[in-house]
């Protein structure tokens, strides 16, 4: 045996292959890796102990706000108000220690003014955030150093549909970062993600201002689409990858705040909004004469089916959500038709308000406004509450951050506090 062959055999015995490497289950943007609210993790607790899973660590003094954190490369990123300043911060995923914190703008004077709404989006060594006052910033993940910035109002005459501040989370797509200033001639803007230069602007006549929803993508008839929900006069909108307006669907839009992110599979979308004049709809998209249009498959008024905020997740052929205005009544509906399969009329004991939702390993996770966490079986057969508990050390303010499930942990932001739980089954 030659020395080189011997060395090769030794190395192959001690160096793990790529197939043996521990998979990463980061949560690098709004609603997770694919913007669906779902994690691919397995081996998680099927039942929680009384009082909840084991706490790994807690953090505080993060600044006020409703911003859901993101997780990438051993760091947890978030936003908040620290007095007169709006800040972005990074914590160690291991122990919650603060790695850096930087100011991106003055704290915007908006309704429900506790703090930021947007989830930071991680792309390699860069981080993209939208402040409540419309500041879109690109920062370095290593130290928070600013690379470039834009302001929706100053640069694009952008506006919100109502006075609660810009809330969307920016979307990275290839070389672009996309966001929604909300003006009629720059409803959606695509920026070069490295430089911040404007690549294209999508004009939507009578857009009615930016909504509180975030952009998702679909491909129909070979055409890339960007979809979101904006103001009352436009509702669901779609533009193509050059910024050309394709369609609007107004029926579910309300005049106060259109919030949930659209659920997409193939050429079908499921959209919902809250308030009395909102509701839910299933649309099938199709190409015709070089443009994308839609067929309304189903529409349900608000009293029958609506998600105020907290979002919806698609598991198999069913959508799970919290139903009702300022309510998170667990509900399961068929994705293809919107037909309600079950609704938990009695809800979750002691829970109140809307519920941020996520999915992992056969279960729906719901984080209620008042700090109750619930674990629900993801089954269309019937509502089954598996476990619930109250978060420790609650802020006693609105807890609108969505659950984050990353690398075997459940991460919950509660205004200036954060708590991290161990979800791995022993």
Image (cartoon, helix red, strand yellow):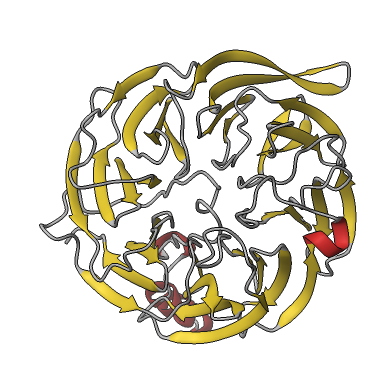
Q: Residue at x 75, y 39 (%)?
A: 208
Can residue 400 be seen in the rendering of this structure? yes
Expressed as whole percent of the image width and height from the top left, the position of residue 263 reads 55, 34
Residue in the foreground of this view, choosing between 118 and 82: 82
Image quarter of residue 322: top left
Circle count: 0
Q: Is residue 304 left or right of residue 112?
A: left
Q: Quadrant of the C terminus?
A: bottom left
Report the quarter where the N terminus lies: bottom left
Does 152 sit above or below residue 46? below
Residue 142: % across, % down: 61, 83
Q: Outermost residue toward the left?
A: 50
- Left or right side of 332 for 28: right
**412 left or right of 345?**
right
Q: Report whether 20 appears left or right of 260.
A: left
The answer to whether one can see residue 1 in this image is: no
| Residue 91 x/y as whole percent | 46, 79
Q: Quadrant of residue 227?
A: top right
Foreground: 283 or 317?
283
Vertical placement of residue 287 versus 413, above or below = above
> Residue drawn 61% across and 61% down?
110
Residue 421 in the image, given as x and y percentages of width and height: 27, 66
- The image quadrant of residue 121 is bottom right
Look at the picture and state if 258 lies above or below 142.
above
Residue closer to the observer: 216 or 326 = 326
């Amino acid at each position: 045996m030659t020395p080189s062959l011997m060395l090769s055999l030794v190395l192959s015995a001690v160096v793990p292959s790529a197939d043996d490497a521990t998979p990463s289950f980061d949560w690098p943007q709004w609603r997770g890796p694919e913007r669906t609210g779902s994690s691919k993790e397995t081996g998680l607790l099927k039942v929680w102990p009384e009082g909840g899973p084991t706490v790994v660590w807690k953090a505080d003094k993060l600044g006020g706000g409703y911003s859901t954190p993101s997780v990438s490369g051993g760091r947890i990123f978030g936003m908040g108000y620290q007095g007169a300043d709006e800040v972005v911060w990074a914590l160690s995923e291991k122990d919650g220690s603060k790695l850096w914190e930087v100011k991106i703008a003055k704290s915007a004077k908006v309704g429900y003014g506790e703090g930021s709404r947007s989830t930071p989006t991680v792309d390699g060594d860069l981080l993209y955030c939208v402040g409540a006052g419309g500041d879109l910033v690109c920062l370095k993940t290593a130290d928070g150093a600013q690379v470039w910035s834009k302001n929706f109002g100053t640069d694009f005459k952008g506006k919100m549909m109502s006075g609660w501040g810009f809330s969307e989370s920016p979307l990275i797509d290839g070389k672009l970062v996309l966001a929604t200033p909300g003006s009629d001639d720059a409803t959606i803007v695509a920026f070069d993600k490295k430089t911040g230069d404007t690549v294209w602007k999508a004009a939507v006549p009578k857009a009615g201002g930016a909504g509180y929803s975030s952009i998702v993508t679909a491909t129909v008839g070979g055409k890339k689409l960007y979809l979101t929900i904006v103001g009352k006069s436009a509702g669901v909108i779609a533009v193509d990858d050059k910024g050309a307006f394709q369609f609007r669907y107004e029926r579910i839009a309300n005049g106060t705040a259109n919030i949930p992110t659209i659920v997409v599979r193939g050429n079908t979308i499921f959209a919902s909004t809250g308030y009395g004049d909102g509701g839910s709809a299933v649309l099938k998209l199709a190409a015709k004469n070089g443009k994308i249009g839609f067929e309304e498959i189903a529409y349900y008024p608000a009293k029958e089916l609506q998600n105020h905020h907290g979002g919806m997740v698609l598991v198999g052929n069913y959508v799970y959500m919290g139903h009702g205005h300022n309510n998170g009544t667990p509900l399961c509906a068929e994705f293809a038709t919107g037909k309600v399969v079950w609704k938990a009329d009695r809800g979750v004991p002691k829970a109140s308000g809307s519920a941020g939702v996520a999915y992992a390993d056969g279960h729906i996770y719901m984080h209620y406004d008042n700090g109750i966490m619930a674990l629900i079986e993801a089954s269309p057969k019937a509502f089954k509450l598996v476990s619930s508990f109250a978060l420790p050390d609650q802020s006693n303010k609105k807890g609108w951050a969505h659950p984050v499930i990353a690398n075997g942990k459940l991460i919950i932001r509660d205004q200036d506090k954060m708590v991290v739980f161990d979800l791995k089954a022993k």
